[in-house]
Structures are given as structure tokens and as C-alpha cells.
Amino acid sequence: MSLSELPKLELHLHLEGAAPPAFIRGLAKEKSVDLSGIFREDGSYAYRDFVHFLSVYEAATSVLKSPEDYARLVTAVLEESAAHGVVYCETFVSPDFCGGSDVGAWREYLHAMQDAADRAEAQHGIILRGIVTCIRHFGPEKAKASARCAAETAGDWITGFGIAGDEGQGKPRDFAYSFDMAREAGLRLTAHAGEWGGPQSVKDALDDLKVERIGHGVRAIEDLALVDRLAEDGITLEVCPGSNVTLGVYPKWDQHPIQKLRERGVKVTVSTDDPPFFHTTMTREYEELERAFGWGAADFHEISQTALAAAFCDEDTKAKIAKRLEDHPHE
Ligand code: HPA
Ligand code: ZN
């Protein structure tokens, strides 16, 4: 079995965080911006820890200045994802970075991204959908402007609303107004929690934001009553094991709780988060899961079915993806 060829779904991918470093260096050169401080000698992104990662991420993002730049980014990212067997991907996009959360500007960025996604689908068969994401350390007021952009453009392509950024700042309830606005616009909801925050941060996201998926959520394992609640309520976790190991949430793959969560009945899926930052790809995630937990074709097929059920896209799109999964042997 070739792990790179297995059809995969990815529910948790930050668009700018998926930018290949060479792509960002190329844009910086075109725009005469000096970004040398954010790269190591070997060309990879340089950061010390999670909070520093967020500032390097924002520096890299600063060279993406127009709808055309975002279209090029979507093209580069989907080409890479398709090469790793990804057939369906949901990506986080932030109006804060795309026109400063002005609805008119946001629409232009969105159209450019959608056009690029349509071209990639025609060329590589990969399907992309967007989740508008507010940024926790930018505060609740900026989040409201992002939620307004999300509500105004909710539909076939923008399928969800979420929150990323520094989990150490503010509380989920500070963002409840924005999540209510997104929910009323028909958007599906997810929130980063339980990566840097403990089990209480997962409970807060569920209780205060009423999300149906949690980004990461892995530290729920520290409270088995919460694990059972996740299982009973059918909450899906967007687990990014390689990200967690690289950032030191867990010291080694073998110690990652994904397998324990799954065994206790929690719906788990697998994603890369910010692949070049964390030196990973979907293929690498699968290779490490095979090595650490003995996962094989049947396990990966189950993970894909879980992701398909939890995907925010419409039923026609799900049927197309289901066909791609069935076309591949998994016994
Ligand atoms: N986690 C939280 N916020 C982020 C990330 C991430 O991996 N990438 C970009 N914003
Ligand atoms: Zn993330």
C-alpha cells in the first residue's frame, strides 16, 4: 500500500500556514520586503515556540497583499495537497489578512481564492472549501468584523466559522457574539481548544460557542468524563499529531493520545495544521500513525469516513468524495 496515494480528507489547514517557504520568499523578493529573519539557513521557517510561531506566521502572511497573491497561494497549496492524495480539504481563511475585514475587499479575495480552487479541482480533482476564522489574540471586536464577512459570504464555498490564534488570550465566551452571528447565517462551527489549554478550554468552547468540531481538543484526554462527553455528543476532533509533536505538546508520536481517544469512542480525524512550519505532510502523518500505532488501510479508511461525515460541505459534494474513497481498495 502506498500511503501517499491513499485518498485523504483534511479538515484543519491554515491557508497561510500551508504556504511553502520558497513561495513566501518569492513574494517577498517581488515586493522588496526583507523577510530574511523568519527563515533558517536551510530555507525552512524559523521560530522558537508557539507564540513566536504565530508572529513568524504573521510576518510571512504580510507579503500576501492582494486577491491575486491569495489565488497564487491557493494554487500552490492545492498542488502540494493533491500530491499527497488529499481529495477534500477545508482551509481556514481570515478576513483580517484579506482586506482588513472590509466586506467589499473580502469578497474580492474570496472570488480570487474560489477561482483558483475551481482551477485546481479541474486539474487535480481536489475539492476545497473555506472556514472563515477569527483570530483570538486580535480580540473580540475584530472577530465581529470577521464574523460579518463570514455571514455576508456564507454559502456553498464558505461553509464554516472558527477561531484560531493564541489560546492563552481571552476566553471563548468573549467571542460568543461572533459565533452566534455565524450560526444564524447558517455556518457550521469549530474552535481551536485543548491544544495549549487543558480540558476546561474544550468544555468552554463546547458550552460557550456551541461548536460541533474542535480544532485539536487532544488535551481532553486529561479528563475522562470529558472524553466520554465528546464521544456521546459525537463531537469530531480535528487532530494534528505532527503539529503537536513538533510544538512539544507531546514529546513523541507514541505518546500522542489520538489512539486512546479513538479507542474510547471519540470521532478523530487527521490534519497537518501548518505543514511546512511543522515539517509535515498528510503522507508523513499517515506514515507516523502507521509506525506509532500500527494503523493500516482499514484504519485510514475509517478516519476518512469520519472526516467525510464531519465535513462542512453540502451533500452533493460529500457524495462525490465518497465515490473517490470507494474507488480505492481498503480491505
Ligand atoms: N494554531 C493556532 N492558530 C494558528 C495556527 C495554529 O496552528 N496557525 C495559524 N494560526
Ligand atoms: Zn490550527
Image: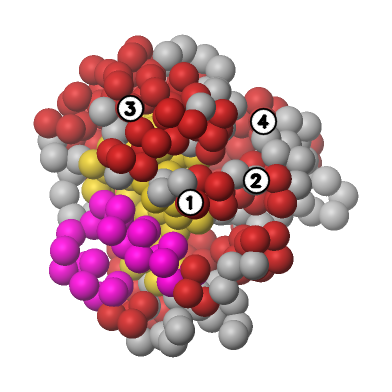
Give the amino acid type for the residue marked by disc 4 in the picture.
Phe
Which mark is first along the chain, 2 or 1? 2
Which mark is first along the chain, 3 or 4? 4
**Left or right: 278 as drawn, with respect to 231:** right
Name which residue lies at 42% across and 29% down.
226
**Left or right: 72 as drawn, with respect to 119:** right
Element on which disc 2 rests: loop
Q: Give the mark toward the camera: 1 or 4.
A: 1
Q: Mark 1 points at which residue?
A: 262
Residue 230, percent across and down? 37, 37
Q: Distance between the residues labelled 4 and 2?
A: 18 Å
Which mark is first along the chain, 2 or 4? 4
Q: How far apart are marks 1 and 2 (CA)?
A: 12 Å
Give the extent of the magenta segment. 300-322
Element on which disc 1 rests: helix
Q: How far apart are marks 1 and 4 (CA)?
A: 26 Å
Name which residue lies at 56% across and 29% down.
222
Q: Give the mark toward the camera: 1 or 2.
A: 1
Q: Distance between the residues labelled 2 and 3?
A: 22 Å
Looking at the rendered image, the quarter that the N terminus falls into is bottom right
Q: Name the residue under label 4.
A: 50
Which mark is first along the chain, 3 or 2? 3
**Left or right: 2 as drawn, with respect to 182:** right
| Mark 3 surroundings: few (<14), some (14-19) or many (≥20) residues within 10 A | many
Q: How far apart are marks 3 and 1 (CA)?
A: 19 Å
Residue 260, percent across and down? 55, 47
Magenta residues, dominant SS class: helix
Ligand 1 lies under 8 Å from the Cβ of mark 4: yes
Name which residue lies at 43% across and 71% down.
301
Where 169 falls versus 10 (above or below)? above
Q: Mark 3 points at which residue?
A: 206
Which mark is first along the chain, 1 or 3? 3
